[in-house]
């Protein structure tokens, strides 16, 4: 039997991930200069919601840190703190620590107080420097009295037309204070819903000599709220203190019936500042900005301007269930292919009811497959936010000023791809900051901004996802890379390499350009790990660099690891599947289209350009090169740099969806082969990785001479 509390706890940590994402979005907006009241409220609300939920589960370390963070953010909301560079850097660090505490609480790991304590102390010091001093009367007055409060003393909002009046009795229990919740924030959240009048009942407060527990909760409140939002919105405010208080909500029978109370005598205390931005419900729901004292004629109401559309309803589903659904859809695709092949073999005419029904089934299968793939697809935004933390930590470790720019955060890709991309991207981001960017003074000496830039972009291209990591640093010093590779014995001293081949030396195991081993680099494992991890996903990584201007790494990956559209071809009696996204066009070669090039290769002329001709059967080792390529079928496949390559096949059988079955776990990485699939007749076919195959091709399209011919050629002084 499942533990309901365990499910609620797991749901809380899932919500924490969403709130942390909202927190980072808000902080990034503030760093970009959008530090308006709504953005600040969103950031504050995210931290407050995490604290409230953590208190309900007794996560004391998380509650304590979130409370300090929330207090500092409240100073920002009140206008006593300005979101300048130093403050935002501390808030970003605080968000990183908060994420660590959430993860440690979820996994049951101990808290690293040596990491948390300094940031917590900095947040406390930040809040202390902006605290408003209270009037020093020398007396603490605990006289029992009924106190009416209005949270906006300057101009309370006018009553809403035809709005019912709700009476709320709110009595905190000791557990509410122990969990780190603050009644004032709840009352402020109610204040966002409409005109609010508050009465504080303190008649049960004992004298100081009899107060054994100051957090026992001796005071309670009666509140009257005039709003059209309804009871559900009111109860939503108290979600995180459910079970920690006595709460009674009902429609007030006689309207606003709280008596007028005498105003307190003026004191020497400073005049209250303008009312701070009001908190929204601690559950992370939509918020509205506070209404100013008056709205000038012709200007929009800020409350209406800040309104946000209601979020769409969502359902959280265990990932294992989605994986099982994906596998079942894959089986449907295989069975649909088997059924199509059986109908074809039976010779059923095209216009028969069976064929018509099969075509409808084919379309339905495709729609189901696309819908299921959309369920698994997620934006890369969460991954990019993790990389922002890597940039902050690496820049602090190297002493470099670095700014991360992101594009295409909403680009969607399979969740499995996102999870397995985290490690390679971490290596590449660290490499860009540590190796790619120059030191601050060196950048200024070369006429560059002192602050370096690392760009992280994601986009869809030709049925694949492309992620680019670029920096505006010094670029790759190819002479230094070549010299280092020779000294490390990775290549011979007389090697003649192109720029691309020199750049690819960075991916060799054990290669590093660092002069000394540090916490970030020098051991020669980073880029090798990157290439291995990306190849395991069926992807490729390439490098482009300009000396003095910067370097970019481009990762190309399949959108999904489950199903793809492919073209089924035959080569030397073998059936091969080529991803449809890699094929640019198909051609039938004429005798005049093929030209000899060198002793063992051919090129094909296509629209006033010549392309190398690759014999797929010979490249895969299925047969020797053909003697004549006239009347053969050629597939033009796109390479990483966009240029096409011509690949000869014997025949094209079909175009269909195929289910991807990985080979890496059983056979390791096979050059030129991405995966395998099961066809409609039960036959297993290999799925080609055409770009990898082209990059490794030997290009031989002529038969080698037989032994007797070679002997004759040697005797006459010639060799082929």
Image (tube, rainbow, N blue to C red):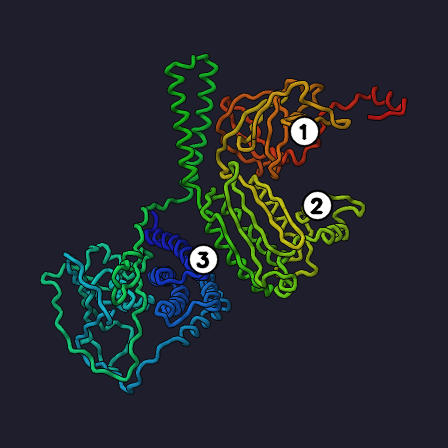
Q: Gap between marks 3 and 1, in whole Å? A: 57 Å
State the residue at coordinates (69%, 51%).
510
* Element on which disc 3 rests: helix
Query: Residue 137 at what x, y percent from top left?
Result: 28, 86
Residue 103, disc = 3
Q: Position of residue 538 (x, y in %)?
A: 56, 39
Instruction: Determine the residue located farthest toward the left in the rendered image.
Output: 254
The quarter holding residue 571 reads top right
44 vs 467, left or right, is: left
Q: Is residue 129 left or right of residue 593?
A: left
Residue situated furthest front in the rendering: 298
Q: Are marks 3 and 1 in contact (CB under 8 Å)?
A: no
Q: Is residue 520 above or below residue 340?
A: below
Residue 178 visible to the viewer: yes
What residue is pinned by disc 1?
A: 610
Residue hosting label 2: 499
> For this view, does 4 lie left or right of residue 720?
left
Of marks 3 and 1, which one's residue comes earlier in the chain? Answer: 3
**For the C terminus, which image quadrant?**
top right
Q: Nearer the viewer, residue 408 or 694?
A: 408
Labels 3 and 2: the sequence-earlier one: 3
User: Mark 1 packing: few (<14 Cα in 10 Å), some, or many (20+)?
Assistant: some
Q: From where the camera sits, is residue 242 visible? A: no
């Amino acid at each position: 039997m499942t533990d309901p509390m365990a499910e609620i706890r797991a749901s809380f940590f899932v919500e924490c991930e969403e709130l942390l994402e909202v927190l980072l979005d808000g902080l990034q907006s503030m760093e970009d200069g959008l530090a308006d009241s709504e953005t600040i409220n969103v950031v504050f609300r995210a931290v407050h919601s995490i604290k409230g939920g953590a208190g309900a589960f007794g996560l004391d370390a998380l509650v304590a840190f979130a409370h300090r963070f929330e207090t500092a953010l409240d100073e920002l909301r009140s206008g006593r703190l300005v979101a300048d560079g130093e403050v935002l850097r501390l808030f970003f660090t605080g968000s990183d620590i908060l994420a660590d505490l959430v993860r440690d609480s979820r996994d049951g790991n101990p808290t690293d107080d040596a990491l948390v304590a300094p940031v917590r102390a900095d947040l406390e010091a930040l809040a202390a420097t902006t605290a408003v001093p209270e009037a020093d009367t020398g007396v603490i007055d605990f006289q029992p009295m009924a106190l009416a409060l209005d949270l906006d003393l300057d101009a309370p909002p006018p009553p809403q037309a035809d709005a019912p009046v709700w009476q709320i009795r709110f009595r905190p229990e000791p557990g509410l204070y122990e969990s780190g919740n603050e009644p004032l924030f709840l009352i402020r959240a109610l204040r966002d819903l409409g005109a609010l009048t508050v009465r504080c009942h303190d008649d049960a407060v004992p004298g100081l000599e009899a107060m054994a527990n100051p957090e026992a909760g001796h005071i309670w409140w009666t509140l009257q709220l005039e709003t059209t939002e309804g009871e559900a919105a009111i109860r939503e405010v108290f979600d995180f203190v459910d079970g920690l208080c006595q709460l009674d909500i009902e429609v007030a029978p006689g309207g606003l019936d709280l008596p007028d109370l005498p105003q307190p005598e003026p004191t020497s205390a400073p005049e209250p500042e303008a009312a701070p931005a009001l908190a929204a419900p601690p559950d992370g729901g939509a918020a509205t900005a506070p209404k100013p004292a008056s709205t000038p004629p012709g200007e929009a109401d800020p409350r209406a301007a800040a309104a946000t559309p209601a979020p769409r309803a969502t359902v959280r589903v265990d990932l294992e269930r989605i994986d099982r659904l994906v596998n079942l859809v894959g089986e449907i695709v295989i069975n649909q292919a088997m059924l199509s092949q059986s109908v074809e073999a039976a010779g059923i005419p095209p216009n028969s009811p069976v064929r018509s029904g099969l075509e409808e089934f084919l379309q339905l299968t495709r729609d189901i497959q696309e819908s299921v793939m959309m369920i698994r697809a997620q934006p890369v935004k969460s991954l990019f936010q993790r990389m922002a933390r890597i940039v902050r930590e690496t820049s602090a470790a190297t002493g470099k000023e670095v700014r991360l720019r992101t594009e295409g955060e909403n680009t969607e890709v399979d969740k499995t791809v996102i999870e397995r991309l985290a490690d390679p991207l971490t290596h590449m981001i660290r490499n860009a900051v540590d190796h790619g960017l120059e030191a601050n003074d060196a950048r200024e000496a070369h006429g560059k901004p002192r602050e370096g830039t690392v760009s992280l972009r994601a986009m869809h291209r030709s049925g694949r996802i492309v992620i680019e990591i670029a920096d505006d640093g010094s670029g790759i010093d190819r002479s230094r890379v070549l010299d280092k590779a020779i000294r490390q014995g990775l290549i011979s001293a007389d090697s003649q390499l192109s720029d691309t081949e020199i750049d690819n030396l960075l991916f060799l195991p054990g290669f590093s350009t660092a002069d000394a081993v540090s916490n970030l680099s020098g051991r020669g494992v980073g880029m090798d790990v990157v290439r291995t991890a990306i190849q395991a996903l069926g992807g490729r990584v390439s490098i482009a660099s300009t000396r003095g201007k910067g370097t970019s790494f481009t990762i190309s990956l399949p959108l999904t690891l489950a199903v793809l559209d492919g073209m089924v071809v035959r080569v030397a009696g073998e059936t091969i599947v080529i991803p449809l996204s890699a094929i640019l066009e198909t051609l039938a070669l004429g005798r005049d289209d093929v030209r000899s090039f060198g002793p063992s290769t051919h090129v094909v002329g296509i629209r006033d350009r010549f392309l190398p001709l690759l014999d797929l059967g010979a490249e895969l080792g299925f047969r020797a090169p053909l003697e004549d390529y006239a009347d053969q079928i050629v597939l033009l496949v796109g390479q990483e740099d966009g240029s096409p390559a011509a690949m000869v096949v014997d025949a094209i059988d079909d175009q269909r969806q195929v289910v991807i079955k990985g080979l890496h776990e059983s056979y390791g990485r096979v050059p030129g082969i991405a995966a395998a699939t099961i066809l409609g007749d039960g036959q297993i076919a290999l799925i080609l990785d055409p770009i990898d195959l082209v990059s490794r091709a030997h290009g031989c399209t002529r038969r080698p001479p037989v032994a007797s011919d070679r002997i004759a050629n040697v005797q006459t002084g010639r060799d082929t």
